[in-house]
Each structure stands twice: as C-alpha cells, then as structure tokens.
Amino acid sequence: MSRTNFDQLLQAGCHFGHLKRKWNPAMAQYIYTERNGIHIIDLHKTVVKIDEAADALKQIAKSGKKILFVATKKQTKDIIADKATSVNMPYVIERWPGGMLTNFPTIRKAVKKMANIDKLMQDGTFSNLSKRELLQITRQRAKLEKNLGSIADLTRLPSALFVVDVLKEQIAVREANRLGIPVFGIVDTNSDPNNIDFIIPANDDAKDSVEIILTACCNAINEGLEERKVEKADEKAADAQADAEAEEVKPKRAARKPRKAADAPAEAPVEEAPVAEEAAPAVEEAAE
C-alpha cells in the first residue's frame, strides 16, 4: 500500500512546478504538462518515488544509522525541525557550514567547544570573569547553538542526506556526492536530478507539499526504528534462553571431599636386600 496517494498530493499542491522558462530539461520525464506558463509535475510518478525513498530510509533507520535533514528555506525550517526531532535525527535549518561533511573533524571541534563552554558555566568557572568577557562567551555560545546545536549528537558522518531544495542546497549535495553518501531530495522542475540518488519530484516551495512528503518519510523512519527495537529485544531474549539452556546441559561436578589420613592407602613395606647373607658365599669362594 502506498504511503501517499494522488489526491493528497494534489490537495497539498505538490504538482506545481516552476515557470517554463526556468525549467531544467533533465526533469522532462517527471513533467506531465504545461499550464499558463507553469510546468505541472506528474503526481503518479511522485507517489512511486515517495514509496521508494521511504522504503530506503526505513532500512537505513533500521540498521541504526543517522539521516541528516537539510533545509534552509524560511518556509520549511519549522517543518524540518519538528519532523527530524520526532524521529531523533540531526538537521540543518540555518546556513549550511561549508565543509561540514568533507571537513567533519573541524565541525566536531566546534561542537565540543560548545560543550566545554556549558561545562565551565555549570562548575562556576565563569563567575570570576568580567562582564565583557562573559558577554563575549555567551554570544559565541549562542552562535554555536544556532548553527550546530541540532547536530550536537552527530558523532560521525551521516549515512544519508535528505534535502528539500537540491538547487539551493547544492553545496551539501556536492559534499555528499564526493563522500559517496546517498542523497534523498525533493526536486522541483528547475533543479538537476542527476546528482540525487532518490528523487522525489514535487513542489519544494509550498509548505504543505514539503510537510506531506516529510510526514510519509518520517513515518517510514519511525517504523524502521521500532523494528530495530523489536529485533534487539528478540536477540536479547534468545541470548538469555541460550545461556539458560547451556547452564542446564552443563554437567554438575560433585564437590571433592578432602582425604583423611586413615582413608589413605597404606604404603607397601620396602623389602631390604639380604646384603650379609649374599656376601658370605662370595667370601668363601674367594678363599678356595
């Protein structure tokens, strides 16, 4: 069963593309027609592509890997933040920090710096600073929180990238392509789909359009996370059962009792050789 249908996408305005003069010829296969100078996206293909992307995202989440959501458009920031937070995934809704993927260790240093500032604030180290120094550090902390706070839990490179507008976020797409990270993208008629691994042809400007697609994808991610929890619980139960069976099969050894001196077997007496009796005949033979 499809996660969306034609009527839902039509009502959300997913079929509206850009002006005909702004189109990208690579998107021709996903365009149904042109009306009043605006391209109309084929929503039947959109439904199929949403299902393909959702299934792939579900498998990634089921394997315990992270998916980074990227959308810096003003009208989609809140949607991305809500949906990504609901499935406990990192997201970027402010300016994309250049080199975030290709220079990931430097980004991690900035995140650690933010954590160190929090630690120093809690242990009272900043109480001895002047007001000016404290204000500077507070402003620096706020800036780091705004740009990197949503990826504080991202300790390693994400396994996938979900981009709302691939044309606007082309730097993020290039970095992901360079590192071989699969890219899921909502692609409008003015964008190039060649660098996107999982294409979702739809309107990337309308809030309702983005929300309905993200809802379907995040529901799939949530399903993958739930299945992972169930599998872990089953594995834990199976391991516990195997250990219990092993303990039952293991033979029980009787405790050894210490030997008493009376129970110890008596040693056989050592017979002494009759040295004197054997020596006498030898002496007599020598005298003769």
Image (cartoon, rainbow, N blue to C red):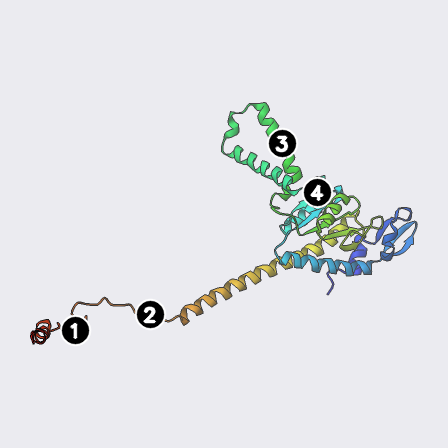
Residue 93's label in the rendered image is: 4
Characterize the local packing of mark 1: few (<14), some (14-19) or many (20 or more) Cα atoms within 10 angstroms: few
Q: Kindly identify the residue that appears in the image at 88 percent across and 46 percent down.
A: 22
**Residue to which mark 1 is pinned:** 268
**Residue to which mark 2 is pinned:** 253
Specify the quadrant that holds the N terminus. bottom right
Question: Mark 3 near mark 4, Cβ–Cβ under 8 Å?
Answer: no
Q: Earlier in the sequence, mark 1 or mark 4?
A: 4
In the image, is residue 50 above or below residue 288? above
Image side of residue 169 versus residue 234, left or right: right
Observer-side mark, 1 or 2, equals: 1
Specify the quadrant that holds the C terminus. bottom left
CA gap, disc 1 and disc 2:
32 Å
Characterize the local packing of mark 2: few (<14), some (14-19) or many (20 or more) Cα atoms within 10 angstroms: few
Residue 29 location (% of width, % of height) = 86, 57
Foreground: 107 or 210?
107
Residue 259's label in the rendered image is: none
Amino acid at pointer 4: Ile
Quadrant in the rendering for residue 112? top right
Helix, strand or loop at mark 2: loop
Residue 145 location (% of width, % of height) = 63, 37
Q: Kindly identify the residue that appears in the image at 71 percent across and 56 percent down.
A: 216
Q: Earlier in the sequence, mark 2 or mark 3?
A: 3
Q: Earlier in the sequence, mark 1 or mark 3?
A: 3
Observer-side mark, 1 or 4, equals: 1
Foreground: 149 or 195?
195
Q: Earlier in the sequence, mark 4 or mark 2?
A: 4
Q: Kindly identify the residue that appears in the image at 49 percent across and 64 percent down.
A: 239
In the image, is residue 29 above or below residue 285? above
